[in-house]
Amino acid sequence: MKTVQTDVAIIGAGSAGLPAYRAAKAVGASAILIEGGPYGTTCARVGCMPSKLLIAAAEAAHAAAHTAPFGVHVDGTIRIDGPEVMARVKGERDRFVGFVVESTEGIPEADRLIGYARFIDDGLLQVGDHTQVRARSVVIATGSSPYLPEMYRKLGDRAIVNDDVFAWNDLPRKVAVVGAGVIGLELGQALSRLGVDVTVIGARGRVGPLTDPEVKAYAEKVFADGFRFFARAEVEAVSREGDSVRMRYRIGSDTSDVVEDTFDYVLVTAGRRPNVAGLALGNTSLAVDQDGVPVYDPLTLQVGSHPVFIAGDVNNVLPLLHEAADEGKAAGTNAARFPDVAPLVRRAPISVLFSDPGVAMVGARFVDLAPGSFVVGEVSFEDQGRSRIMLRNRGLMHVYVDKSTRRFLGAEWIGPDAEHIAHLLSWALQMKLRRHHRDHVSLQRIWPNDGLISDICAKEHQRPFQLVNFLRERQKSSFLRLFSFLNAD
Ligand SMILES: Cc1cc2nc3c(=O)[nH]c(=O)nc-3n(C[C@H](O)[C@H](O)[C@H](O)COP(=O)(O)OP(=O)(O)OC[C@H]3O[C@@H](n4cnc5c(N)ncnc54)[C@H](O)[C@@H]3O)c2cc1C
């Protein structure tokens, strides 16, 4: 058995672990990066990248099928070649993974260990059966794994998770997606647009990440127009019949509300669980929560008062790539500088469901705002100019503005290309833009600002005239100007 000493040991070479390693090295510490699985990260292998590749193929198919209203006719049948679709998804995905693997393998060999790590005590790790690592600080960046509830396990290879979709060589005929979160809706819509017969079965009325009831109800209708979608249903029974799955699910309280159907696969997107089981945390003095995750400070990512930090999906808070990267960097720096730890400066919250129309959230969620403390600016995309031009005029946006401070708090919406507005809003929120910034902002009109501004004008009782005058004076409007006005002293 080999024993090595290091300042910082990082468990997991994913989107959090890699920046943690680099951050620790950047402040002069020695560091060892430990990875049990293949290099390449969840994001590139089975997450963000292949899901967006599948969505891109779905968008191409959808666009090809919807040209006629523009007077552009694609004559003949549109043929979706499943093996070709999956070959491109996997080929491009492998290209992306290749870059990550190359950069990970560029880390000096002495700083890398292959094997699953588990704690022997607070500062001693066993890696595989070959090495022990004595570390001054540890960063846990082990990510999360898809959760497969017990009832689906008996279905064998017909119960699948997102990882399995990206291993397909062809598209199946008919799939039930269990779970209406971000992953379920992204994959459900993409598969449906690629000609797969899709049923998405949610459990608790969830529609992606949305918490605003009106936006959620609108989004539910939009998705239900594209494929069978039940946001609030209950799967009562599943069984395997040959190479198919027989499923019984309930969509209401009447006896007639029970549906029986047969699918090629059940794609279970019922959440993810932090990868902590293999860490043998019982051998440490770290306190853990009900999910077995070490209890940590969300600002410094430090576990109790220990020289242990936890970053990325494993900490079970914001399972997003950019959050994992930011947390990894902060955890690596804090681990290297321990006991001199500093809080992580989080970016403005932003999350996007890459559907069409897209779903996005920026800043505070509706559900987290105190009732009565804010006004809601609303805009519909149905009559919004640019959206109609593109024939993509479906959507509803709610923007929340604090009544007393007039500050922009957050927004939830479904609408065309939602990610672009999301970036702009999160930028405005992050920059805490104020009125004096307006002259430096050269961005022009960005839809759907006009409707939104009128609506907030009507509701912003404290300074409606000033707001109107401000907009008149400028003659142009944009979200940035709106928010710099709202945030003005
Ligand atoms: C289908 C899907 C789509 C997504 N789309 C998006 C998107 O569009 N935008 C976005 O922002 N986010 C998206 N995400 C989320 C994003 O992929 C994750 O937030 C990110 O990958 C988390 O990085 P991480 O470092 O925490 O985990 P990972 O990248 O999973 O890294 C953890 C690593 O730890 C290793 N490991 C685990 N246990 C041990 C151990 N005991 N010893 C050694 N190594 C260990 C694992 O093998 C793994 O390599 C998506 C996720 C999925 C699943």
Image (cartoon, rainbow, N blue to C red):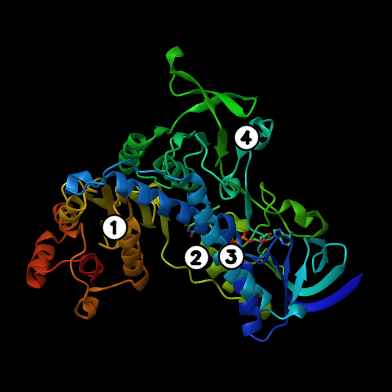
Q: CA distance from mark 3 to mark 2?
A: 17 Å
**Is 228 located above or below residue 332 in the figure?**
above
Q: Nearer the viewer, mark 3 or mark 2?
A: 3
- Which residue is disc 1 drawn over? 402
Q: Give x and y (percent) for residue 411.
A: 32, 55
- Which residue is disc 3 drawn over? 97
> CB under 8 Å between callouts 1 and 4?
no
In the rendered structure, the answer to whether residue 284 lies left or right of residue 1 reads left
Q: Give x and y (percent) for residue 35.
A: 72, 65
Q: How many marks?
A: 4
Q: Amino acid at mark 4?
A: Arg
**Is 120 located above or below residue 273 in the figure?**
below
First along the sequence among labels 3 and 4: 3
Note whether ligand 1 is within 8 Å of mark 1.
no
Q: Residue at x 76, y 57 (%)?
A: 279
Query: Seen from this angle, which residue lies furthest front?
Result: 76
Q: Nearer the viewer, mark 2 or mark 1?
A: 2
Q: Amino acid at mark 3?
A: Val
Of 405 and 352, the residue lying toward us: 352
In the rendered structure, the answer to whether residue 103 lies left or right of residue 83 reads right
- Which residue is disc 2 drawn over? 322
**Mark 4: secondary structure:** helix
Q: Amino acid at mark 1?
A: Asp
First along the sequence among labels 2 and 4: 4
Q: CA distance from mark 1 to mark 4?
A: 49 Å
**Is 340 located above or below residue 144 in the figure?**
below
Q: Residue 299: tell me if it is visible.
A: no
Q: CA distance from mark 2 to mark 4?
A: 32 Å
Name which quarter of the figure residue 334 lies in. bottom right
Q: Amino acid at mark 2?
A: His
